[in-house]
Amino acid sequence: MGSPLSAVLANLFMEFLETGPFANIVPEHVTWLRYVDDILLVTPRRFNLHRLQTALNEVEPTIQFSLKEEIHNSLPFLDTNIFKYGNQLEFKVYRKPTNKKYLIHFYSHHDIRTKIGVVIGIFLRAFRICSAKYLEEECRFIKETFLTLKFPEFLLDNCRQQTAKIWESSRQQDNTTRRLVLPTSDGATNLTHLLRTTNLEVVCQTSRTIKDTTKTKIHNNQTPGTKAVIYHIPCSGCDKVYIGETSRDLNTRIREHRYDVRHDVTTNACVTHRNKENHLMDWKNVELLIREPDKIRRKCLETAIIQGTNTIEQNRGMFNISPHIISLIPMASKILNI
Ligand SMILES: [Zn+2]
């Protein structure tokens, strides 16, 4: 069930079975309620469940049902415990006996908003599932659980109040508004406009995911001009050079270096080299080595070039790269002639 497609495919397959072979096996007076691969059956008292189970399991060898019957008028289904009182049903949050109450510790290194979000999420589940009869007991259980995780009591009471408000407003909204969730924000404005007279609200899922942030971007066109570059400044007094990179314009960056030298900013390697060796940098022979719009790639290349070059006493770059690896980086080895 790990893939995003799994639930969709499971639903499709189960619907295929339900409208086809299962329709002939499950009697009409049996209530069949399914959530993905969990089914709740309501049957007459003397119904032979085991015979039905055997018949269902014969249909498709890969779909094998296990059976759980109610015990003492109660039956867990998904995260709900259902209780039967005469003709009435009552509901309570169901926890597996193996539940270990490992949620989030108050002193864990998470943002306070995350911690509050977890508490509200769990309270909200209680509000959603529990009958009035069981709500208080469940809220008490939640509070006790988070107290053992060192959450302050006032915060938990506050979260519960907030949850009650959220629950109330969501119930009021549910009667009037329906949401249409789009996987992209493209065209959403047009759709919102078209649906303005209906009670449908258009909601867009964010298009920026962690994957977008971390995957390597492919740049079809290089940044024109002298922006996003790796450069070198030779020393006029020895054969050492300074290697640097900037996302901004090279001329701006060089002006900053010259400003640092004039004002003796000792965090600048050009300044420390001058102070130590009494050498001046050769500003006329500054050279643009590589243009690379991707910041991470640029930093890596800068590091590789620094570590393969006789530089002045400057920062060695982001990380250590062995000379063998440097020779495998085409752009760096071209610059370094290796
Ligand atoms: Zn020098």
Image (spheres, rainbow, N blue to C red):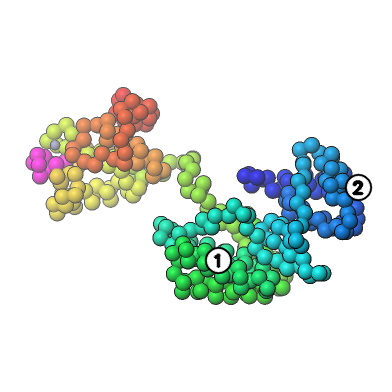
**Residue 127, percent from left and from top:** 63, 69
Q: Is residue 2 above or below residue 160?
A: above
Which residue type does callout 2 highlight?
Answer: Asn
Mark 1 neighbour class, 10 Å CA radius: few under 14, some 14 to 19, many 20 or more: some
Residue 180 forms part of the magenta stretch: no
**Residue 282, percent from left and from top:** 17, 39
Q: Residue at x 76, y 57 (%)?
A: 70
- Give the mark, 1 or 2, whose residue is nearer the N terminus: 2
Q: Is residue 249 left or right of residue 149?
A: left
Instruction: State which region is magenta.
Output: 273-282
Which residue in the protein does label 2 denote?
24
Count of labels in the image:
2
For the residue pair 244 and 135, the one nearer the viewer reads as 135
Q: Which quadrant would residue 160 be assigned to in this image?
A: bottom right
Q: Which quadrant would residue 20 be assigned to in this image?
A: top right
Q: Quadrant of ligand 1?
A: top left
**Residue 82, percent from left and from top:** 73, 63
Q: Residue furthest front?
A: 72
Q: Is residue 329 above or below residue 270?
A: above
Q: Is residue 241 left or right of residue 338?
A: left
Q: Quadrant of the C terminus?
A: top left
Which residue in the protein does label 1 denote?
142
- Label 1 or label 2, whichever lies nearer to me, is 1
Q: Residue at x 87, y 46 (%)?
A: 51
Query: Disc 1 versus disc 2: distance between alpha carbons?
Result: 45 Å
The answer to whether residue 190 of the structure is visible from this angle is no
For the residue pair 176 and 59, the one nearer the viewer reads as 59
Q: Residue at x 47, y 45 (%)?
A: 214
